[in-house]
Amino acid sequence: MPGAPVAEAVLTEIDARVEALRGKGKTVGLGTIIVGDDAPSHSYVAKKHATSEEHGVESHHIELPADASLQQILEAVHRFNEDPAVDAYLVQTPLPNRDHEGAVLEAIDPDKDADGMHPTNLGRLAYGIDCPVACTPAGIKAMLQHYEVPVAGRHVVVVGRGPTLGRPLSILLSMKAPGANAAVTVVHTGVPNMADYTRQADILIAAAQVPSIVVPDMVKPGAAVLSGGITWQGKKLIPDVDEACADVAGWITPRLGGIGPTTVAMLLRNAVEAAERRVA
């Protein structure tokens, strides 16, 4: 099932909230910081800004060279932390120097965390405290709700345990809340008998960023299957779920236009909510 209708519903809601904020004299500001010249990252950031502008959200952008020092990146983060025009922002990952990512992430003001990835916000999520939620997990939950896929009491298997997707998603779907309350199992590439778990899933979500890690014989017939992880191979986007899984699944996201549109919509929603907190 495509993500576009889900994203459109979220963005329609965002339009009304942006207009309400404008009536209070507040323009929503979303910022991005990108380091280096990674083509997929630049493409993704450009999509974020294009969608922002279409929906009345002001874009702010800082671009740094690939050899930027940690101090230079932290200075950019500090600029956005202190800028009242920027309600929420993100630092596009991966950074050229992966060793910088922890320090950069922790330097972000948790209240301006557009990606929902600050340790404070992941902790708030675990405790069920209102906070910005990681965008792709939030988009996956929204897709399941939009298409009325039963989640409560069902067995969800998440393939992948990363901090941007698998880990927050497992928390989000196991919470006692609408659209959640599932029994969640998390497996990963270190589990040798992964298929023994995935074949039990009523809802199977691949979040490992390993191309075609989920193949048809790993899918329970009739299961809902979502590919949250993607990998660029040259100019081609390869999902974690092999396209042949459509022959087994009862419901599946497409290779293109699946989770991606909802991720961008949830990013804008986090920015709008941050702006609403500032004027409350």
Image: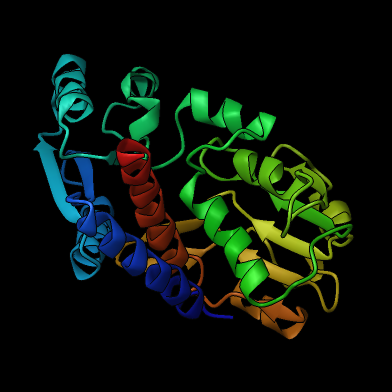
Instruction: State the residue in front, 227 or 125.
Output: 125
- Kindly identify the residue that appears in the image at 89 percent across and 57 percent down: 153
Does residue 256 appear in this view? Answer: no
- Within the image, what quadrant is residue 122 found in? top right
Position of the N terminus by quadrant: bottom right
Q: Is residue 45 above or below residue 3?
A: above
- Kindly identify the residue that appears in the image at 38 percent across and 19 percent down: 106
Q: Position of residue 151 (x, y in %)?
A: 79, 62
Q: Position of residue 232 (x, y in %)?
A: 38, 59
The answer to whether 265 appears left or right of 138 in the picture is left
- Kindly identify the residue that appears in the image at 61 percent across and 40 percent down: 168
- Kindly identify the residue that appears in the image at 52 percent across and 43 percent down: 133
Q: Position of residue 137 (x, y in %)?
A: 57, 51
The answer to whether 228 appears left or right of 157 in the picture is left
- Within the image, what quadrant is residue 112 found in? top left
Q: Is residue 148 above or below residue 209?
A: below
- Within the image, what quadrant is residue 162 found in? top right
Instruction: State the residue in front, 204 or 137.
Output: 137
Q: Position of residue 260 (x, y in %)?
A: 43, 65
Instruction: State the residue in front, 201 or 25.
Output: 25
Position of the C terminus by quadrant: top left
